[in-house]
Image (tube, helix red, strand yellow):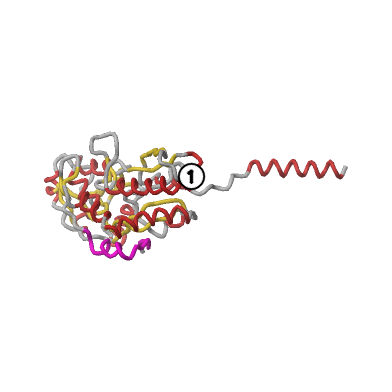
Amino acid sequence: MKTKKLMTTALISAGLACTLPAVAASTLEKVAASNKITVSYREAAVPFSYFPGTDKAVGFSVDLTNAIVDDVRKKLKKPNLEVATIPVTSQNRILLLVDGTYDLECGSTTNNAARGKDVAFAISHFYAGTRLLAKKTAHITSYADLAKKTVASTAGSTNEKVIRQYNADNHLDMQFVLGKDYGDALQLVESDQAVALALDDILLFGLKANAKNPDSFEVVGDALQVEPYGCMLRKDDPEFKKLVDGTLARLMKSGEFTRLYNKWFESPIPPKGMNLNMPMGAQLKANLSALSDKPAQ
């Protein structure tokens, strides 16, 4: 009887063990086992990651991603490593990374303490601030001009939180409409469903450059807060973070990072050959030496 009871207990324990989730493999182990790495892209985050009318995303962050993938190939000794791509939005980018749908996002994602509870960030590769894009005919010159008007942003973005907080703090009684992504949010302003779009300044310059009528728009308002962009990866994976940080540090120290910056921010870019004319800011220049991954305050 005792033996039977022990056997039953063992079988129940074994059954429970089978239902428990397996311990997650590190990103490099996962990639090595499948011979595939999955990276994300954004559809309209000019000049970081966007579609210029081709079937492949291009941009500054895409070039950084490609450099990281090359280092993964070298690390794993897998020159024929398969690279899969997946589109993400402000709303789903963290969830899909955490659940293992994809492995790396180098886009226009702000590194902040709240997100740091769920994901990890690499060395900051850009610094941006929330500003406004508006039609010149709307005569929006400051945030005070938005009182009792409708403002657009993207759902789930830090910009949405920042502009909502500014509205509450200053009692401006703004109304809000949210796009699922940057192109969708711009359409809200183009179609006069909103008088202005609140986003990171660089994204606004990119959207303006590629709008149907760029000269009809202007970027206005002071930056409400400065935010560092970082490549995003899963938490508690020090080996992969070390590789990603190592790639970025190498690019920054060699001058290749500056060359890529000039390519996307100070030169004509597809599809219209527009030049954003946005020199590297002081914070980013300093980070080429500091190599900080410090989140926004």
Q: Position of residue 21 (x, y in %)?
A: 59, 44
At x 37%, y 46%, the residue is 70
Query: Splitting the image into 4 quarters, where does residue 246 fall?
Result: bottom left
User: Which residue occupies 37% across, 61% down?
Assistant: 293
Q: Give left or right: position of 55 versus 21.
A: left
Q: Is residue 45 above or below residue 253?
A: above
Q: Position of residue 202 (x, y in %)?
A: 23, 52
Residue closer to the observer: 120 or 69: 69
Q: Nearer the viewer, residue 53 or 32?
A: 32
Task: Estimate the x, y position of residue 196 in percent, counting from the top left.
Answer: 21, 49
Quick one: quadrant of the N terminus?
A: top right
Stretch of the chain drawn in magenta? 280-296
- In the rendered image, the quadrant that contains the C terminus is bottom left
Which residue has dot 1 on it? 99
Query: Considering only vertical position in the picture, is 118 above or below 211?
Result: below
Mark 1 nearby-residue class (10 Å; few <14, some 14–19, many ≥20): few
Q: In the displayed structure, does residue 271 sit left or right of residue 168?
A: left
Tag count:
1
> Helix or strand or loop: what does disc 1 sit on?
loop
Residue 9 lies, in percent from the top left, at: 77, 44
Q: Is residue 17 magenta?
A: no
The residue furthest right is 1
Q: Amino acid at mark 1?
A: Asp
Quarter-of-image position of residue 36: top left
Q: Residue at x 73, y 42 (%)?
A: 12
Q: Nearer the viewer, residue 252 or 75?
A: 75
Q: Quadrant of residue 44?
A: top left
- What residue lies at 27% left-to-right and 52% top-to-bottom? 199
